[in-house]
């Protein structure tokens, strides 16, 4: 996230013609949160929005998540960027993986519905959102592997052990062929 700080300083210099936004893929118990927007573009997506003046990426994301969902989150890692047009101005957005300790969502007026989607079903939502949710499962698995998201540690270590056993089983017969 430190690398993004220098990018943020540069983007702030361009603020008169570029908007800066953040979005958060909220993770809770092997599910990701999608919110249904009430204003264009009317579709499903993660919580997020524009940064305020002198606000860091993480502070802005935590504020947006709380305003839109009532949830407190921990920002884990950045996973993707997006650049495009919004309200006739160029926008640069960064999406982060976030961990929350609760699933009790309180929606803001910006949204009319929410859904906690299991990781393995995210690809089924790709036509209902303007985000590439099919990639989210990979992003989340990467965050679990590198950051060891709490609540998922035991299963992660079990998956690592199973993977190591498969690799070992595949390699062992080769070693003893000579």
Image (tube, helix red, strand yellow):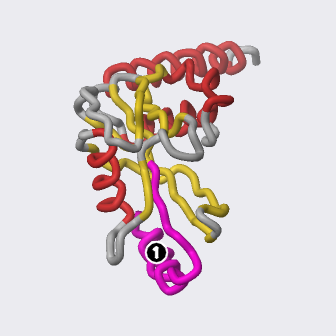
User: At which x and y percent is residue 132?
Assistant: 64, 39
Q: Name the residue rendered at 28%, 55% in the picture.
A: 63
User: At which x and y percent is residue 1?
Assistant: 41, 63
User: At which x and y percent is residue 53?
Assistant: 35, 76
The residue beneath circle 1 is: 8
Residue 18 quadrant:
bottom right
Depth check: 167 or 130 in front?
Answer: 130
Neighbour class for label 1 at 10 Å: few (<14), some, many (≥20)? Answer: some
Q: Is residue 75 above or below residue 130?
A: below
Residue 170 quadrant:
top right
Is 96 situated left or right of 154 in this image?
right
Depth check: 147 or 79 in front?
Answer: 79
Which segment is the magenta one? 1-23
Q: Name the residue rendered at 38%, 33% in the picture.
A: 27
Judging from the image, what secondary structure is the residue with disc 1 in?
helix
Is 31 situated left or right of 93 in this image?
left
User: At which x and y percent is residue 43?
Assistant: 57, 36
> Residue 149 lies in magenta, yes or no?
no
């Amino acid at each position: 996230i430190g690398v993004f700080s220098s990018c943020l300083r540069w983007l702030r210099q361009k603020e008169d013609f570029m908007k800066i936004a953040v979005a958060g893929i909220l993770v809770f118990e092997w599910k990701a949160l999608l919110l249904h927007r009430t204003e264009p573009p009317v579709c499903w997506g993660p919580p997020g929005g524009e940064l305020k003046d002198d606000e860091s990426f993480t502070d802005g994301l935590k504020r947006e998540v709380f305003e839109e969902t009532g949830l407190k989150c921990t920002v884990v890692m950045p996973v993707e960027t997006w650049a495009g047009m919004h309200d006739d101005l160029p926008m640069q957005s960064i999406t982060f993986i976030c961990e929350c300790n609760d699933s009790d969502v309180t929606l803001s007026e910006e949204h009319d519905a929410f859904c906690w989607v299991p990781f393995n079903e995210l690809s089924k939502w790709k036509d209902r959102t303007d985000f590439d949710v099919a990639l989210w499962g990979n992003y989340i698995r990467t965050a679990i592997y590198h950051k060891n998201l709490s609540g998922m540690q035991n299963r992660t270590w079990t998956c690592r052990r199973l993977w190591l056993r498969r690799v070992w089983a595949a390699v062992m017969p080769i070693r003893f062929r000579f």
